Image (tube, rainbow, N blue to C red):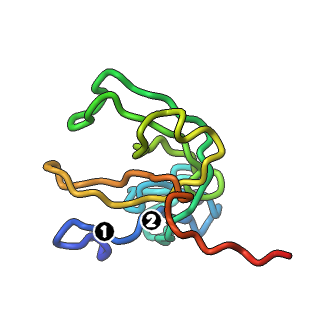
C-alpha cells in the first residue's frame, strides 16, 4: 500500500505523481499508473504541488455535480504541475474575485466527507516575493 496515506486522513501537502519513464505528471499521487505512458505505480514518484499556480479558467457551478459539493461552487482550472491540468474547488466570494491569472494555492479543508483540497487566492496571504531585480 502507499506509505504516504496517513491514518488521520489529513494530508499536509498536495502531491502528484511524477513518472520516472516519461517525466509526465499524474494526479492524484496514488494513481495506479502513469496517465501518459502507462508506466506502473512503481515508476512514479510523489512530488509536492503546493503552488501558487495561476488560475487558467474559472466557472461558477449551480448544480451539485458531485456528492458534498455545496452550490453555487466556484470551480477553477489550474496547472498543478507542468502539463497537469486539474479542475479544483476555489474558495472565493464569487467568480469575479478570482479572475483567470489569479495565483492560487491549495489548502486542506476538513468536512463531513473527510475533507479535501480547495484553492485560495495566494494574494490573500503573505507570499514571499522573488527577488529578481
Ligand atoms: Zn509516464
User: Dot 1: within a 10 Å radius of its alpha carbon, few (fewer than 14), some, or many (20 or more) residues?
Assistant: some
Q: Element under label 2?
A: strand
**Front residue of this view, candidates 95 and 22:** 95
* Quadrant assignment for the C terminus: bottom right
Residue 113 lies, with reference to residue 9, above or below; the image says above
Quarter of the view holding residue 24: bottom right
- Identity of the residue furthest to the left in this view: 112
Residue situated in front as seen by the camera: 122 or 18: 122
Q: Residue 15 shows which numbered tag?
A: 2
Q: Note whether ligand 1 is within 8 Å of mark 2.
A: no
Instruction: Report the residue marked by disc 1.
Output: 11
Residue 98 drawn at (x, y percent): 54, 41
- Up the image or down, 45 lies above or below 30; here it is below
Q: Do the residues labelled 1 and 2 touch (CB within 8 Å)?
A: yes
Which residue is drawn at the image coordinates 38% and 51% (left, top)?
Answer: 118
Instruction: Say which element carries label 1.
Output: loop
Q: In this view, does 77 lie above or below 45?
A: above
> In the drawing, does residue 17 fall left or right of residue 99?
left
Q: Quick check: 106 left or right of 66?
A: right
Query: Residue 64: percent from the left, percent from the top?
Result: 28, 26
What residue lies at 16% left-to-right and 49% top-to-bottom? Answer: 113
- Residue 130 lies left or right of residue 7; in this view the side is right
**Number of dots carrying numbers:** 2
Amino acid at each position: 500500500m502507499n506509505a504516504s496515506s496517513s491514518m488521520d486522513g489529513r494530508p499536509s501537502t498536495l502531491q502528484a505523481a511524477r513518472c520516472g519513464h516519461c517525466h509526465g505528471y499524474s494526479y492524484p499521487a496514488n494513481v495506479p499508473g502513469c496517465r501518459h505512458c502507462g508506466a506502473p505505480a512503481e515508476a512514479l514518484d510523489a512530488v509536492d504541488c503546493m503552488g501558487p499556480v495561476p488560475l487558467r479558467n474559472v466557472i461558477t457551478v449551480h448544480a451539485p455535480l458531485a456528492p458534498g459539493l455545496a452550490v453555487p461552487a466556484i470551480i477553477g482550472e489550474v496547472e498543478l504541475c507542468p502539463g497537469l491540468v486539474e479542475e479544483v474547488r476555489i474558495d472565493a466570494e464569487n467568480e469575479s474575485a478570482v479572475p483567470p491569472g489569479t495565483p492560487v494555492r491549495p489548502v486542506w479543508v476538513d468536512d463531513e466527507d473527510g475533507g479535501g483540497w480547495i484553492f485560495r487566492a495566494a494574494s490573500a496571504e503573505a507570499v514571499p516575493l522573488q527577488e529578481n531585480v
